[in-house]
C-alpha cells in the first residue's frame, strides 16, 4: 500500500470494505486517523461520520469525485485527496494530521489551564459572600 510505503509514521490498524464495517471498526478500535472514501457500499463517507457519534479522530477523504470537497471540509476533514492519489499529496495530508495532533496537545493544555482558572475563579465567588459577613 502507498501509505505504508511513503508515510512511515502511519500504522494501518484496519481496512474496511463497507461503510457498515467502517462504523463498527471506528467504534471498536478508536483510530487517530481515518482515510474515508466518499462512495462505499451501504453508506457513503458522510453517513459513516454521521453514524459515528463521537468523532475524536482526524479524517482524510479519498475519492474520485471533486464535487464533495466543500462538504468534506464542513465535516472538518483535514484533507481531501482525489484518486488516483498523488504520493506527495498523501504525504502532505499525513503531515497536516501530525501538525494538528501537536496543536491539539497545546489546545488540551490551554483547556486544562482554563478549567483550573475557572475552578479557582468559582471558588473565589463561593467564598466571597462568606468573607463579607
Image (tube, helix red, strand yellow):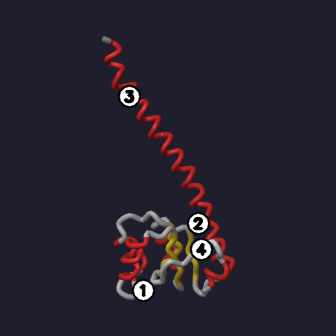
Residue at which label 4 appears: 10
Name the quadrant of the N terminus: bottom right
Residue 41 vs residue 112, the one in the foreground: 112
For discs 3 and 2, the disc positioned in front in the rendered view = 3
Name the quadrant of the C terminus: top left
Instruction: Point out the tag, 1 or 3, that comes first from the N-terminus.
Output: 1
Q: Residue at x 48, y 80 (%)?
A: 14
For discs 1 and 4, the disc positioned in front in the rendered view = 4
Give the vertical position of 25 relative to 64 (above or below).
above
Cα distance in 3D space between marks 1 and 3: 52 Å
Cα distance in 3D space between marks 4 and 2: 10 Å
Instruction: Point out the tag, 3 or 2, that comes first from the N-terminus.
Output: 2
Residue at which label 1 appears: 40
Instruction: Point out the tag, 1 or 4, that comes first from the N-terminus.
Output: 4
Q: Residue at x 58, y 81 (%)?
A: 82
* Disc 4 and disc 2 in contact, CB within 8 angstroms: no
User: Which SS class for mark 1?
Assistant: loop
Instruction: Point out the tag, 4 or 2, that comes first from the N-terminus.
Output: 4
Tell me: 78 left or right of 121: right
For discs 2 and 1, the disc positioned in front in the rendered view = 2
Across and down, in percent, residue 125 comes to 37, 25
Residue at which label 2 appears: 97
Across and down, in percent, residue 45 comes to 43, 78
Residue 1 vs residue 75, the one in the foreground: 1
Cα distance in 3D space between marks 1 and 4: 23 Å
Amino acid at each position: 500500500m502507498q501509505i505504508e510505503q511513503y508515510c512511515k509514521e502511519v500504522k494501518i490498524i484496519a481496512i474496511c470494505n463497507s461503510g457498515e464495517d467502517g462504523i463498527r471498526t471506528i467504534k471498536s478500535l478508536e483510530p487517530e486517523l481515518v482515510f474515508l472514501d466518499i462512495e462505499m457500499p451501504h453508506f457513503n463517507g458522510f453517513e459513516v461520520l454521521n453514524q459515528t457519534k463521537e468523532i475524536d479522530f482526524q479524517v482524510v477523504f479519498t475519492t474520485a469525485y471533486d464535487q464533495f470537497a466543500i462538504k468534506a471540509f464542513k465535516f472538518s476533514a483535514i484533507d481531501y485527496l482525489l484518486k488516483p492519489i498523488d504520493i506527495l499529496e498523501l504525504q502532505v495530508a499525513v503531515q497536516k494530521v501530525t501538525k494538528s495532533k501537536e496543536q491539539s496537545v497545546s489546545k488540551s493544555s490551554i483547556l486544562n489551564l482554563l478549567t483550573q482558572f475557572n475552578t479557582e475563579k468559582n471558588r473565589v465567588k463561593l467564598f466571597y459572600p462568606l468573607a463579607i459577613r
